[in-house]
Image: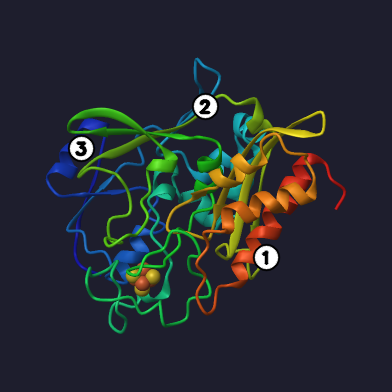
Amino acid sequence: MTPFTYARAADPASALAAASAGARYLGGGTNLVDLMRETIERPAALVDVTSLSAEITETAEGGVLIGAAARNTAIAEHRLIRTRYPALSRAIVAGASPQIRNMATAAGNLLQRTRCAYFYDDEGSACNKRRPGQGCDAIDGFHRMHAILGASDDCIATHPSDMCVPLAALDAIVHLHGRDGERTLPLTGFHRLPGDRPDIETELRPGELITAIELPASPLAARSTYRKVRDRASYAFALVSVAAALEVEDGRVKDVRLALGGVAHKPWRAEKAEAALRGQPANHAAFLAAADAELADARPLRDNGFKVELARRTIAAVLGELAGEVA
Ligand code: SF4
């Protein structure tokens, strides 16, 4: 590990000042410290931001504001999250292990980096995300876990977060504080597709600090869920995951939210499927047709073509569960 300095920020202003001087923000450290041990990341200075807001509070509009330093376990177990946004609670519990969830923070979850094995192999593999222009050994390598949507010729990595998938489905808003003041971004616009710069993963400006994640009020969200398909029953990343919320009226889909994990460089909001489903009968055939509308853009590689059918069936199964279909 490369030597580094460590300091704790008492407030956002001191965190921003440290970042301006070149420090990296440290949350629970459950990803960044791993990357530092592997020398993929080599920050010279860390500023610990875990003493900033970890509160989970109701907003005046009836939504919920999650402080950036809130631990994943606290979010998953919070009454407001379990009752109003159950998909988020389920997604967090489906991720990592209890020990990691006890440490990991809300903001850190958004900033996780891919678990592509070639990205971690600094000595032996080419990776455009580590070194732009170097090449991507995953494309002709072992890419069973990699992206089927939104990938590029430069990177086919997936985003590893479970938590971000329901956040994308439920229209979460990311609150930011930077040297130009405060601003917000929709979660769906926070992460980037790889394009020709897979090393740039978010729309964060230099030194910008995530201060909170807001979930807007949504009656639909109370009828949301999350399903993760993976190789092992626990402590495994998603092959495919689905976050969905559904409102059915007189047997037809009145409204729907849908997002996919494990399939792209960012949490994938399935807007084509949503558009295809609104007004349609709430039945298995319509759910499959909506999945097909989204997955028509899939570009699978040699080893990950199974994800297309897996995503299709998982979307239909999750929507069927929400519609009360008997499987
Ligand atoms: Fe690197 Fe992306 Fe290729 Fe993986 S898929 S080796 S992260 S460029």
**Which quarter of the rendering shows the N terminus?**
bottom left
Instruction: Kindly state the secondary structure of the residue where label 2 is placed.
Output: loop
Q: Which residue is mark 1?
A: 233
Residue closest to the far left: 21
Q: Is residue 11 visible?
A: no
Gap in angstroms between the C-alphas marked 3 and 2: 27 Å
Image position, residue 322 (x, y; %)? 75, 41
Mark 1, other Cα within 10 Å: few <14 / some 14–19 / many ≥20: few
Q: Nearer the viewer, residue 281 or 258?
A: 281
Q: Nearer the viewer, residue 231 or 92?
A: 231
Image position, residue 154 (x, y; %)? 32, 69
Question: Residues at badges 3 and 2 in contact (C-beta under 8 Å)?
Answer: no
Residue closest to the far top: 60
Name the kind of residue labelled 1 in the image. Answer: Ala
Identify which residue is drawn at 20% across, 35% down: 14
Residue closest to the far right: 326
Mark 2, other Cα within 10 Å: few <14 / some 14–19 / many ≥20: some
Q: Is residue 38 visible?
A: yes
In which image quadrant can residue 159 be found? bottom left
Q: Closer to the camera: disc 1 or disc 2?
A: 2
Name the kind of residue labelled 2 in the image. Answer: Pro
Name which of mark 1 and mark 3 comes first in the sequence.
3
Q: In this rendering, is residue 201 above or below 309?
A: above
Ligand 1 located in image quadrant: bottom left
Gap in angstroms between the C-alphas marked 1 and 2: 31 Å
Image position, residue 264 (x, y; %)? 47, 59
Q: Which residue is mark 3?
A: 16
In which image quadrant can residue 3 be found? bottom left
Gap in angstroms between the C-alphas marked 1 and 3: 40 Å
Q: Which residue is mark 2?
A: 216
Name which of mark 1 and mark 2 comes first in the sequence.
2
